[in-house]
Image (cartoon, coloured by chain):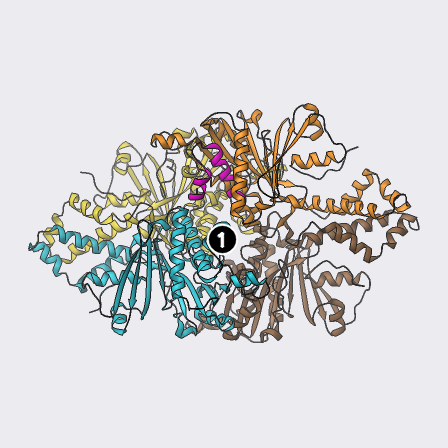
Chain colours: A yellow, B cyan, C orange, D brown
Amino acid sequence: MKRFSPYTDLAIEIAENIMTEATEIEGVEVGHEECDLSGTTVTNVRITDEKGAEAMGKPIGSYITLESEHIKENDIDAHEKIISILSKYIKYLCPDKERPTVLVIGLGNRDVTPDSLGPKVVGKILVTRHIKNTVPEDINNAVSSVAAFAPGVMGITGIETLEIVKGVTERVKPDIVIAIDALAARKVSRINATIQLSNTGVAPGAGIGNKRKTINEQTLGAPVIAIGVPTVVDAATMANDAIDRMLETMKNGASKGSQFYNMLSELADEEKYGLIKEVLEPYSENMFVTPKEVDAVMENLVNIISNSINIAVHPGITQEDINRYKF
Amino acid sequence: MKRFSPYTDLAIEIAENIMTEATEIEGVEVGHEECDLSGTTVTNVRITDEKGAEAMGKPIGSYITLESEHIKENDIDAHEKIISILSKYIKYLCPDKERPTVLVIGLGNRDVTPDSLGPKVVGKILVTRHIKNTVPEDINNAVSSVAAFAPGVMGITGIETLEIVKGVTERVKPDIVIAIDALAARKVSRINATIQLSNTGVAPGAGIGNKRKTINEQTLGAPVIAIGVPTVVDAATMANDAIDRMLETMKNGASKGSQFYNMLSELADEEKYGLIKEVLEPYSENMFVTPKEVDAVMENLVNIISNSINIAVHPGITQEDINRYKF
Amino acid sequence: MKRFSPYTDLAIEIAENIMTEATEIEGVEVGHEECDLSGTTVTNVRITDEKGAEAMGKPIGSYITLESEHIKENDIDAHEKIISILSKYIKYLCPDKERPTVLVIGLGNRDVTPDSLGPKVVGKILVTRHIKNTVPEDINNAVSSVAAFAPGVMGITGIETLEIVKGVTERVKPDIVIAIDALAARKVSRINATIQLSNTGVAPGAGIGNKRKTINEQTLGAPVIAIGVPTVVDAATMANDAIDRMLETMKNGASKGSQFYNMLSELADEEKYGLIKEVLEPYSENMFVTPKEVDAVMENLVNIISNSINIAVHPGITQEDINRYKF
Amino acid sequence: MKRFSPYTDLAIEIAENIMTEATEIEGVEVGHEECDLSGTTVTNVRITDEKGAEAMGKPIGSYITLESEHIKENDIDAHEKIISILSKYIKYLCPDKERPTVLVIGLGNRDVTPDSLGPKVVGKILVTRHIKNTVPEDINNAVSSVAAFAPGVMGITGIETLEIVKGVTERVKPDIVIAIDALAARKVSRINATIQLSNTGVAPGAGIGNKRKTINEQTLGAPVIAIGVPTVVDAATMANDAIDRMLETMKNGASKGSQFYNMLSELADEEKYGLIKEVLEPYSENMFVTPKEVDAVMENLVNIISNSINIAVHPGITQEDINRYKF
């Protein structure tokens, strides 16, 4: 029987979901890193074989999830620490080359605030490809050849995003593509509090809109690091979760063995799915849940992600430069 | 017993809520107008005495609700018809004077898209107060003395909105104040599909943020027409509705008289409220549900409301002028 | 001797400049059309051979210039007439095919208001390439296959614009590319009052920023229609013109044959150029002249150009559809 | 004879202008401070009596001008130093009271980028008036009672700005009003490179648009500190300057005593004014000169001015807090 599963892009949510039933999944390794910042953790989910891939519904590869409440807050010190952690992991996923050629791709629709993360990050990347080898040698040695680019969304361009990205990648010939996209989470608490890195590619429009053809090493011909941040929860997903938690709470409240408890327990998944579907009808797919202060939080995210990339890809750029100059 | 009632600003939603239980409410008159536009209705809820006011939880006065799916659509013909209906009702609530002095107040935070309705409408009002009596006589006769003004929100100004509005009203001395605000609805289906007019004032920030001191004839010293549009549903309200509808659906599915049915029926309101509260915990008050295309829809709303006001208050401005010139 | 010539992108300004000296230029044909709209003219400059190309400093081809004061005004009727004229000329430059495959390219920097014309037009193009052949036959027959795309500017992307455009063009394989760009004019009076069409390509960044590699049939492999609007005058160009006109006025004021007159006349171009250069020193290349209401005027331009293209390229889209629906 | 004098809001430009003719002006004291930041100076022009006021065409009072090329640059260290200098001078002009009640007024039109300085600064002021006395005592002691407010422009509101500001001031009853406005400079080199403080009030719309009634202690009933930044040069002013400098250059080039030199010298001011006027005709008052990167520079200015105010008015807010938290 097909389990009703509300949509999520986050490997960590899938893992959590499955792990309520089993403590270990074959072909999946989960590691944790405590960070030097209160309330901030890094979880590394590695899918190592096909079994793990099937269990998770995600391709083989690394899924690194940074979780921190400080992303939403206007605490610049905390942001600095997050940048330092994030840039380290981006570097870890990058090819081992001192000055790689990098193409940063900002996915999403810049005119829909929670989907504008990618295009806005592009605007803050220190691009150098057009001046590389025309600047003094010491500067030239301090920077990689970096280009950045926002392909837009298919609803505006009429062109499959993968096609545009491929056209540009073929000309830039990067050692690594870094693609940034806004994602959908399942839990409201994750909104703008989680950054996911992976080396398995990204399907544009996963968060807001329809999923498009996946951008990954196979389709693009260059390795891809995907950086995703859940900026919304689909309204239907949220309603579903509310109902699920309600049923759970009712069951917990009923005395075990009572008829009411048994009846709730006996509600087969199938029936529950039908109920939920009926209830959710009015929530069209184009409704989503966002925080009131979404604009301010997006600015924080853009700053954190663009500067993490700037530090990770340019050998001569440090946190100090980031503090001193705005890119 | 206090009934758990998710928040709504719309008189029509309160009336619907109560009327599921009774077909008539004392002190409340409900009238309907069919409009010359498919899928568009006007409902006029008049609270005529204290009994009605108590039943509705709203002050005595007129609450006119225009509902139309066409607000969200990019159908300019339909928008014209809505403008024609709306301007008629604004005129109906205005004092009976050929060229009244009008002060339009745009409430809300212009930097939070679904709350920016009021400030944006201000930008499209044909203001004349500063040129009145300095223009040729025929033009002067065609227009009223109109001023427009966005007071901002208390979180940005540090000043209670009512104070600012009072300060300006005392200087402009209008015959009528028209206040525009974004509201919160209870049902997702009402978002950007409903326009409410009333002559009983408005509490700024009702939709998004905390309720502030009410702007009405008593507090301001001038009669107030409030124009409100629900642009969001609070995330907690939506979750509550999902749960309510689920319980209802479960009850409908259980055979009447069965034990399961009885148990669900016997869930006292009190218990239900407790359950819902527990379930809703994670949905902070600062999360809300909006449609993906919120920017485009806001533009439609601004156009409809500002032009309805322009036609209603200026004796010489017609639909034709609106079509020809942009204000 | 090299003549000091302040920069202009407009063929009509070059022609006017040369024609003050000669009434006819070999290899250049100039035609005029009076339009059914007051104060609106269309000038067709055709450079027919290499001699004309050399005299004009522009490649062989058609340069159609629509001039109208109504672009700046908020007169919707006038805009309709301009759309009707402009769409006719776009069609005239398009390949003779009922439903051509079209790629619209919006050049320029969307974050610099007077340079944002191209990217904003892209957002209002009725794109169909992604749904072509999946819609009912009558709709399918009413539309061409149209895609639209904003490549950004080299300062942000690090990639030569021509490269990006080529990468996308190779994948879309259009019958025609329509490229929109903001231009620099020489005369302040032309700002936002002139639309230039040509079939000879465009060098991105000509108006604001540095000129980049030309996008034309030769470099792209597909014919190119360029639509350009002067939205700024370079500050140095404006200062130069003020000085030129001042010298002219002084000469006109001096009695002919007087010593003062003779001296002014004898100011060789070389000397004048030196003087002007000295005077202009403080006006850096990054200063330009724009009208105060530049945002509102850009909106008019975006509406006029996007709708002219929509009507020109889709066989089933008419002015009436444009009035009824917003794209 | 009335001297043709292109418009400037800057006391320092007026003083420079007069001082080319005389080294001292009666009733005007000019002091300089070298700053601990390369290329940055502070000039303090004090008009001490009516004679000075007449000579300068400005009221009696202090005019402090900070000039620095670093405002335009993205150098965060330099911005910190400028904030430290500026906050010191704001404090110097503030009443001598530990926790004054402050009303910050952001003048200008937020929808015209170079005029949006004031409204944008308002959004970054740490307002406290609405929470004062409701927070823990140590926080309460660290902050003054601060409110902030953007009255809009008369073209949008239909209300004289002074009226709105008066209405709000009467209710807030501040010890000091700090009004921020964008100004017009005479020299292109001053654009976004100069910040002028004064205690003599401000006439809104001086920079862009028509001058309105002055906001000062006399009209408002509370002392006023005006903070102004020249963000534009009027196009006609710039053209005039180009011509003036050209005539000067021609005179310098002509051998003294030659007829050409004498003729140029003999061009009476009156004639010159006529000539200039004729030449300037096409440059309407609504054209102005701005730098290309105006949006980015405005962001720097907003950051510098809002934080200088935050530090100057709140006894417990320091540069360190500014670095740590975003307001």
Q: Is residue A196 above or below residue C139?
A: below
Q: Is residue C94 above or below residue D94?
A: above
Quarter of the image for the C terminus of chain C: give it.
top left
Residue highlighted by disc 1 = B321
Residue C154: x and y, percent?
A: 56, 37
Closer-to-camera residue (A19/C66): C66
Residue A311 seen in the current view:
yes
Q: Is residue C104 above or below residue B238?
A: above
Q: In the picture provided, is C20 more to the left or to the right than C200? A: right
Closer-to-camera residue (A194/C326): C326
Q: Chain of mark 1?
A: B
Identify the residue at horizontal 72%, vertical 26% (top origin): C26
Q: Residue C302 in magenta?
A: yes
Quarter where residue B228 is shown: bottom left
Identify the residue at horizontal 51%, vertical 54% (top origin): B327
Q: Which residues are magenta?
A: C301-327
Q: Residue C313 in magenta?
A: yes
Q: Is residue C68 above or below residue B97?
A: above
